[in-house]
Structure formats: C-alpha cells, structure tokens
Image (cartoon, helix red, strand yellow):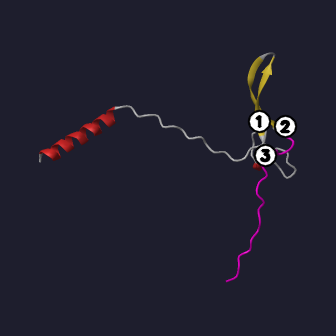
C-alpha cells in the first residue's frame, strides 16, 4: 500500500511540475520547397517557353523616400531549375 502511495505521489509531483514549468520551444523544421529557378519561383510559374509569369514585390521610392512596395513582373527569361519529370498517359490495362 505504501508503494502505491509513493508512486502516486511521485506521479502527481511530476505532473504538477510539468504543468507549472514553461514549455520548451519546438524546433521548427525547415519547409521543404520544390525545385526553384534562379528567380526563386518554381517550374509552375514558367510558361512553355520558360518565361516567368510570377510577380515580384519591389520597393518604390519618391525623391529618396520609400513609398511602399509595388508588384512588378518577374524579369526571368528562361527556367533554369532542374528539368521536371515528363508526364505520360498510361491507359488502363484490360483485365
């Protein structure tokens, strides 16, 4: 009986300490991104010829004073990232 009380006391103490102490910060895992071009955009932002169709935020200035950011087209001329795998159509096989 004493062993069970001692175990319950140890368990309760551990539970109370765990609740009272601040939580540890979890390590944020790096988000895996797909293959990117030199402009920083993926293959899905580039058309068939390779030209980038995404927008880029660039700061705008007026007489040396920052006035905000403006969306401008990306100046990338050709996709330079890894070549995506080709997609094939595979018809279903008859049974």
Tag 3 residue? 81
Q: Residue furthest bottom?
A: 95
Q: Nearer the viewer, mark 3 or mark 2?
A: 3
Q: Main secondary structure of the magenta part?
A: loop
Find disc 2 in the rendering and name its residue. Answer: 75
Q: What residue would you read off at disc 1?
A: 56
- Earlier residue among tags 2 and 1: 1
The residue positioned 78% from the left and 46% from the top of the image is: 81
Q: Residue furthest front?
A: 3
**N-term-proximal mark, 1 vs 3:** 1
x, y (%) of residue 40?
Answer: 75, 39
In the visual, does 90 lie left or right of 10? right
**Percent from the top left, x then y, of residue 48?**
85, 53
- Whether tag 3 and tag 2 are in contact, CB under 8 A, the answer is no
Residue 53 position by quadrant: top right
* Distance CA(mark 3)–CA(mark 2): 15 Å
Task: Identify which residue is drawn at 77% across, 54% down.
Answer: 84
Q: How far apart are the alpha carbons under marks 2 and 1? A: 9 Å
Residue 29 on image: x %, y %: 56, 41
Please name the residue shown 54% across and 38% down the image.
28
Q: Are marks 2 and 1 in contact (CB under 8 Å)?
A: yes
Which of these two is toward me, 19 or 59?
19
- The stretch of residues the image draws in magenta is 75-95
């Amino acid at each position: 009986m004493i062993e069970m009380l001692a175990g319950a006391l140890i368990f309760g103490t551990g539970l109370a300490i765990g609740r009272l102490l601040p939580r540890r910060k979890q390590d944020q895992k790096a988000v895996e991104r797909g293959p990117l071009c030199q402009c920083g955009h993926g293959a899905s932002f580039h058309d068939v010829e390779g030209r980038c169709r995404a927008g880029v935020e660039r700061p705008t200035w007026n007489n040396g004073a920052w006035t905000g950011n403006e969306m401008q087209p990306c100046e990338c001329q050709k996709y330079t990232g890894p070549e995506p795998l080709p997609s094939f159509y595979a018809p279903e096989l008859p049974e």
